């Protein structure tokens, strides 16, 4: 009786294993692939100059971006003014002007010009090289 139960168990396991392997054999196998994302190019490869405007006592809450090419105009823009050790001094989110080569940016905080060591700028969600003119 025990032998019969043992044989029944062995055949049941063989049946289960056969079903598992036959299911796996019916799976489609595809070649390896790597997905990639290609976004639009930046509107310019030129370096844009960022300088202060409306300065009062070496402080300002307004910056001026010069030489904005036509391809960058009327696009969303994000600007961050950094101080030493990467400390964020002020930010601005706006749209570049639709006409003209300059855009005035109102910062969310007043900054002391000597505390700004660099500017990070994106236009149309693409990083743009900048020069800080103070």
Image (spheres, helix red, strand yellow):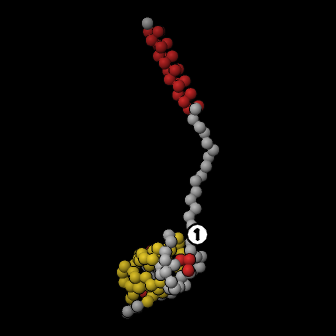
Q: Residue at x 49, y 21 (%)?
A: 13
* Residue 3 higher or lower than 48, as above or below: above
Furthest-left residue in view? 109
Which quadrant is the N terminus positioned in? top left
What residue lies at 58% left-to-right and 69% top-to-bottom?
A: 41
Identify the element where label 1 is drawn. Answer: loop
Residue at the image position 59 percent from the left and 31 percent from the top: 25
Where is residue 62 shown, x and y percent of the image?
Answer: 41, 85
Q: Is residue 4 above or below residue 121?
A: above
Q: How many marks?
A: 1
Q: Of 70 and 29, which appears nearest the observer?
A: 70
- Front-most of 119 and 64? 64
Q: In this view, which residue lies farthest toward the bottom?
A: 57
Q: Residue 58, image x and y in percent?
A: 40, 91
**Residue 92 image point, x, y percent:** 41, 77
Residue drawn at (51%, 16%) of the image: 11
Q: Nearer the viewer, residue 7 or 69?
A: 69
Q: Position of residue 77 (x, y in %)?
A: 47, 75
Whether residue 64 appears in this view of the structure is yes
Give the image quarter of residue 55: bottom left
Residue 49 in view: no
Q: Which residue is mark 1?
A: 41
Is 118 left or right of 58, judged from the image as shown? Answer: right
């Amino acid at each position: 009786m025990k032998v019969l139960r043992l044989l029944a168990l062995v055949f049941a396991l063989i049946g289960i294993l056969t079903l598992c392997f036959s299911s796996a054999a019916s799976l489609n196998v595809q070649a390896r692939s790597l997905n990639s994302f290609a976004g639009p190019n930046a509107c310019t490869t030129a370096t844009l100059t960022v300088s202060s405007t409306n300065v009062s006592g070496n402080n300002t809450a307004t910056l001026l971006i010069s030489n904005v090419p036509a391809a960058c105009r009327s696009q969303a823009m994000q600007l961050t003014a950094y101080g030493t050790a990467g400390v964020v001094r002020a930010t601005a989110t706006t749209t570049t002007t639709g006409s003209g080569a300059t855009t005035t940016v109102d910062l969310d905080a007043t900054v002391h010009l000597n505390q700004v060591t660099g500017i990070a700028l994106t236009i149309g969600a693409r990083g743009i090289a900048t020069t800080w003119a103070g």
